[in-house]
Amino acid sequence: MSLPILSPLQARIVAVLVEKAATVPDTYPLSLNSLVSGCNQKTARDPVMNVSEAEVLVELDQLKTLNLVFQQSGNRVARYEHNLGRVLSVPGAAVALLATLMLRGPQTSAELRTHCERLHKFADISSVDGFLEELAEKSPPRVIKLARAPGAREPRWAHLLCGEVAMAVWDDSATASVAAAQGIDLGEIVAMRSELARQAGEIAELRAQVQRLNSELGLA
């Protein structure tokens, strides 16, 4: 189905709900407090966020209109659950991959198999690749295989639920030649690229917040 581009925080909310449904089923669906804590978690998150309950509530309202999140009724404390698999018409294995990419950023197939273990156990890396290729072939595509980074053995995959990935295409030989000529370590370049990607996520989130404020204030 056609799905609007999600903001980084919207993607984080949905991914946290997917993660916690598998890892803490006894407390799922999540309360707002638990959901905010999951969004602001410092481990297994890239980028790390620091969002408030008010910000999460605004995004939850948008996600509910997209049917990506449901709110349980009849309880004294509001609780939330995701509906990602049904909205995208993908199986649980694909949902686990998408959630892990939304939580941790671009990863190789081997990394995804390891990081998805608590959400879905893949028999082998080829199984991971199979589901990723299916997601990449959807219309519109849900993931993309990135060009291999200098010094990396395997290419990484990234999700497309927040729009095009702001990652430069790597030319291994050219990058290596320039780095060698200038005495720059390739590891430093990879680290800088990763930091730029993290900052791009933060900028996108700030832009979304400004747009929401402008809309609330009736500003153009």
Image: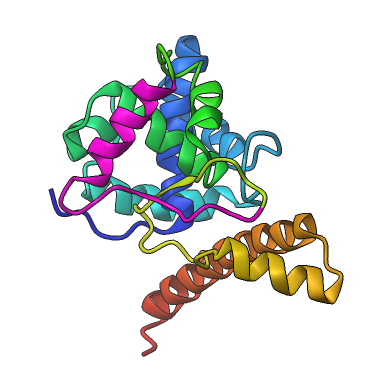
Horizontal and vertical percent for residue 18? Answer: 41, 28
Q: Is residue 164 above or below residue 144?
A: below
**Residue 97 on the magenta span:** no
What is the residue that sits farthest to the right in this orientation? 183
Horizontal and vertical percent for residue 131? Answer: 29, 30
Q: Residue at x 63, y 59 (%)?
A: 198
Q: Is residue 120 visible?
A: yes
The image shows a total of numbered marks equal to 0
Q: How is the image coloured?
A: rainbow
Horizontal and vertical percent for residue 199? Answer: 64, 65
Q: Quadrant of residue 79?
A: top left
Q: Quadrant of residue 212?
A: bottom left
Q: Residue at x 36, y 31 (%)?
A: 129
Q: Is residue 128 above or below residue 211?
A: above
**Residue 140 on the magenta span:** yes
Q: Residue at x 75, y 59 (%)?
A: 186
Q: Is residue 111 left or right of residue 161?
A: right
Q: Nearer the viewer, residue 156 or 63?
A: 156
User: From which residue to which does the magenta span run?
Assistant: 125-150
Q: Residue at x 28, y 35 (%)?
A: 84
Q: Is residue 174 above or below residue 47?
A: below
Q: Is residue 116 left or right of residue 29?
A: right
Q: Nearer the viewer, residue 1 or 152?
A: 152
Q: Nearer the viewer, residue 94 or 189?
A: 189
Horizontal and vertical percent for residue 45? Answer: 62, 40
Q: Is residue 116 left or right of residue 65?
A: right
Q: Is residue 77 visible?
A: no
Quarter occupied by the C terminus:
bottom left
